Image (spheres, rainbow, N blue to C red):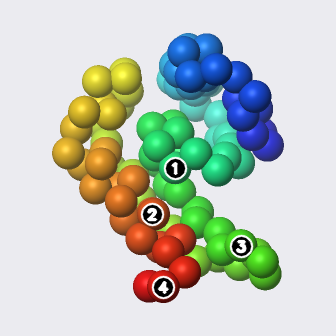
Amino acid sequence: MDEPFGGLDQVTRETMNLEQLRIWEKTRKTVIFVTHNIGEAVFLSDRVFVMTPRPGRLEGIVEVDLPRPRTTSVMRDPRYSELVFDIRRMLDVDH
């Protein structure tokens, strides 16, 4: 899925994220989800592959160890914030 929710407003995007998780819980099918939204990547994923900008290369892989099933309350978990910060730091050109 390549940025399927990119053009949506925040409330609709969160609704679609929850629907994506509900479908995943039911089917357990692997989904490769491309997004520029770090919070969305952490919320939806078990593993985030962080890519660099030009030239695109794999900067690292972050294992997301947040509990499932996930609800929006996980975004208040300190571990969620830590994972988002870790990914932001990986993308920092001055690191």
Disc 1, SS: helix
Disc 4: which residue: 94
Q: CA distance from mark 1 to mark 4?
A: 18 Å
> Mark 1: few, some, or many residues within 10 Å (few <14, many ≥20)?
some
Q: What residue is at 58 percent from the left and 45 percent from the top?
A: 37
Of callouts 1 and 4, which one flags the residue occurring earlier in the amino acid sequence?
1
| Tag 2 near tag 3, CB within 8 Å | no
- The amino acid type found where label 1 is placed reads Ile
Q: Amino acid at mark 2?
A: Ile
- Tag 2, which secondary structure? helix
Distance (Cα) linking label 3 and label 1: 14 Å
Let me know if residue 93 appears in the view.
yes
Please name the residue shown 37% across and 23% down the image: 72
Q: Which residue is mark 2?
A: 87
- Name the N-terminal-most of marks 1 and 2: 1
* Disc 2/disc 4 C-alpha distance (Å): 14 Å
Circle nearer the N terminus (2, 4): 2
Are the residues at dot 1 and dot 2 in contact (C-beta closer than 8 Å)?
A: yes
